[in-house]
Amino acid sequence: MDFSWLPRYSGLITKSLFMTLKLSGLAIVFGMILGVIVGVLLTSKVKPIKYILRAYVELFRGAPLLIQLFMVFFGLAYIHINISLSTTVILVFTLYTGAYVAEITRSGIESIPTGQWEAAHSIGLNYFQIMRIVILPQIITIALPSLIGFFIGMTKDTSLASIIGYSELVKNAQTVMTTTSRPFETYIVVGILYFIICYPMSRFVVFVEDRIRRRQKGIYPVNKTMVKREEFGSA
Amino acid sequence: MFLDWLFPIMHLPEFLGGALVTLELSIAAFLLSLFLGTLFSLVRYSKKPRLLYPLVTLIVEVMRNTPLLVQLFFVYFGFPQFGILLSPTVAGLSVITINSSAYYSEIIRGGIQSISKGQWEAARSIGLSRAQVFTRIIFPQVIRDVFPSITNQLVLVVFGTSVLSTLDVKELTQVASILNSQSFRSLEIFVFVMLLYYGITEITLTSSRLAYKKWFAPRTERR
């Protein structure tokens, strides 16, 4: 094993690591916005919107990311919409993330008992207030493990963008590999970089899941406001 | 611009051939990785044998925290450096298998952990060996409890096989790519393939739901 090539290519590798992080970061931000909106709309009672969005979510969750990348990359050029490669890639990853986040949000909203809706209605909150004050804050705690779990997977999946030529970590690793003819060492370095990004996140998932489990067992109080309210009520 | 939806229908045999390869790869990877994942999970759960535990932990963590594509390139391009030449299908299948067995080992380990220790003790006390306790008492319950997660991972295995197209394994994605470069009917081809994958996913999910109902659903009418 020979890592003597590493210093020469460290600049390229750092730059491509940044490209990977940029792509996954943008996809997380845009995908979260899109996903929460779609997820909320999926629970609405307007049938046409619901069906269209369901089709979107089902298709993007039911086909591999690679096919989505190919479809948008070749398909947009085919119908004469010319956007840059990085825009295309960000678009696909946003749509992909959005579909999953929407499904997580929807199942979160539906897991909240309807009694809470009725209670919130009866104290005079409107739909948006209930969503914002009552429902969404609860979902964040429930959905956090699966959300971060998905983000880990998505960050790893950004490597697929190299196949259509987006110059992130794996794409530039191929360049390094061909010039140094050291594929084994190159992919070890790339693997370590991905590991450094993803491993802390997966430990965090374990930590959060543990926390939630303990809370449900009642080792921790459910949350501070609830404890206070109990004290208030008994007084 | 003309969208020619007859094109994918005319080439249905090629697509179905590709879909068949995808299915074969997925089923092979699924069965192998369920088996290997169970072995991994046992090592991870019992922390025995002492020598194997750190190795299995390393494999599981690395497989779960690096992209499939990198693992694939590592094996396919990296191993020949030491004279180990693998065909694309063998390299791809083994990487997907080990990758998904890492996920299965975590799923199954979680399942084993959620079963109370008292069951082990009770079963041991009526004279079953440790292997018998696991295969007859613990494992069936684990499979029932984690069945939904197993199904989800199976779908991810199906999606994972699409990455093998980068090594020129002739599965559905690669068939689509080849047809695309021959005809440039991109939109028709990839929309069609997306629907095909959706069909495969739906069939997988539906059949697993049926299997769950048949094998594991609580039967209230029985006493």
Image (spheres, coloured by chain):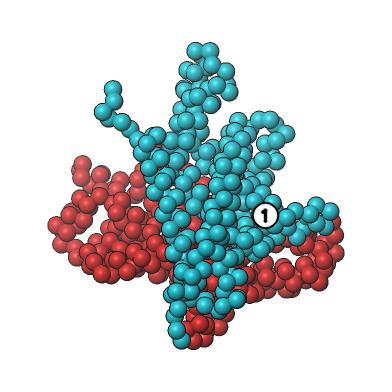
Amino acid carrying label 1: it is Thr
Q: In this view, does B119 lie above or below A212?
A: above
Q: Badge 1: how crowded within 10 Å, few (<14), some, or many (20+)? A: some
Total numbered badges shown on the rendered structure: 1
Residue A32 in percent (x, y) is at: 43, 66
Q: Is residue A44 above or below residue B61?
A: below
- Give the position of the C terminus of chain B as an image quadrant: top left
Q: The red chain is which one?
A: A
Residue A107: percent from left, percent from top: 34, 54
Read off the residue under disc 1: B89
The residue sitting at 68% across, 73% down in the picture is A15
Q: In which quarter of the image is residue B22?
A: bottom right
The chain letter of the cyan chain reads: B
Asked if residue A230 lies left or right of residue B165, the reply is left
Q: Residue B173: horizontal and vertical position, in percent?
A: 56, 64
Which residue is located at x 45 percent, y 78 percent? B4
**Which secondary structure, mark 1?**
helix
Chain on which label 1 sits? B
Residue A152 seen by the camera? no
Q: Residue furthest top?
A: B126
- Of residues A226 and B211, the one nearer the viewer is B211
Residue A88 x, y percent position in the rendering: 52, 77
- Give me the residue at 72% from left, 68% from top: A173
